[in-house]
Image: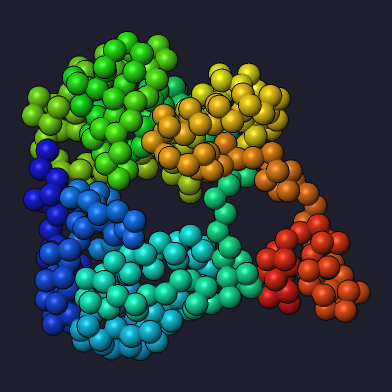
Amino acid sequence: MRQSAVFDVRGLLARYDLPVRMKAEMEAVLTENLKRILSRTRSSSKSASIKTQERRMYTVCRSFVELREVGFMIESPHSLRHKHVQALVTRWVSAGQTGGTIENKLSHLKAFCQWLGKHDLIRALGDYTDRAAHGLIRSYVTTRDKSWEGNGVDAVALIAKIAEADARVAVQLKLQAAFGLRIEESFSLKIGTALRNLDTLRVVDGTKGGRAREVPVRMRLGVLEEAATLVDPNSGSTTPSTYSIARWRSHYNAVLRKFGVCKAELGITSHGLRHEWMQALYKEATGVDAPVKGGRPGDLEVHRQAIQEIILSAGHSKAAKSGAYLSTVTAMERDQRPRVTREQAEAQLIAQNGNKAQAARLLGISRSALYRLIGAM
């Protein structure tokens, strides 16, 4: 599948209302660098994924459009300064964007600025705004069940309906549900060579950071057999060779929207199938539900071992990543506590003569949570 030759930088730039000179200079920089992996800890000959390239492109272009909307009529990307980035962050914070969203945008701008030779231009989010005051403290532990089951959606029944409209999209959803694949992994899985034995599936193509892994098959051979009947002989995957990954993702998302698979309608995304898969693995390994479903680990050693095996099968390297899918007992209990009001925070702060650490302890909240409440006063 020809992924690298079809990303049309010039065509995408044409969609944005920007000066001719700016577009020309951006095209030169993006065409040469867009595929590069940005990392402080490793160098790689691999390219950034198509999805990453798309997000970089969108963020950079939209940022310059937004700067012009707030009155900075710069004509060249090389004119970007600290005051411009500050204006963007202020705008994003005012619009209610989350800390994670803004950090991702700054990451994409950081890559772009490095390609421009402006290596120190983009700073951390905390250098532009008070994260605590604006509720921008990023949490990597979920307290909401994002699985389809947890949102009252029968995955088997809904995917069967989707199959009537598009068998390939449906089977890719089944691959995600059966093996915990990321979306792009399901697009790129080479069915003919992935099954190493009846117990293990080798996931190589479309993986995050190019890290191959082995996934337990768990008697789900039927899904692979169905997928094999839909393999394109040229691409070797269930994605037609006539589509680039970018075009197929657009088609895939359009099909899902028709069936309400989005946060605005059913409250789910296809990534929720990966959540469901990890939660099922956890219950199989420990005998109890994941914390996000109200479970409490019994044997802590069994819990730790289960987490480690699940994380490796999911393609992560750190056990802490499990919190984004399974949550923790502590996070769930904290989420269920009665909410502290602004009035309670203010009264306790006055009672403690302005001692924020003491007030937060007595309120049973973190100091950052107290700072957010104070900022709302």
Q: What residue occupies the far right of the structure in this picture? A: 351
Q: Above or below — where is 183 with respect to 149?
A: below
User: Which one is in front, 266 or 309?
Assistant: 309
Name the residue: 39% across, 68% down. 106
- The colour scheme of the drawn protein is rainbow
Which image quadrant is residue 52 in? Answer: bottom left
- Quarter of the N terminus within the rendering: top left
Query: How many numbered marks, from 0 up?
Result: 0
Q: From this viewpoint, is residue 69 visible?
A: no
Which image quadrant is residue 176 in? Answer: top left
User: Which one is in front, 377 or 314?
Assistant: 314
Q: Above or below — where is 354 with respect to 239?
A: below
Name the residue: 13% across, 64% down. 31
Name the residue: 82% across, 75% down. 355
- Quarter of the C terminus within the rendering: bottom right
- Asked if residue 52 lies left or right of residue 132, the reply is left
Rendered location of residue 373, percent (x, y): 72, 69
Which image quadrant is residue 179 in? Answer: top left
Rendered location of residue 268, percent (x, y): 48, 40
User: Which one is in front, 312 or 338?
Assistant: 312
Rendered location of residue 371, percent (x, y): 70, 71
Name the residue: 33% across, 38% down. 183
Rendered location of residue 2, percent (x, y): 10, 43
Q: From this viewpoint, is residue 147 visible?
A: yes
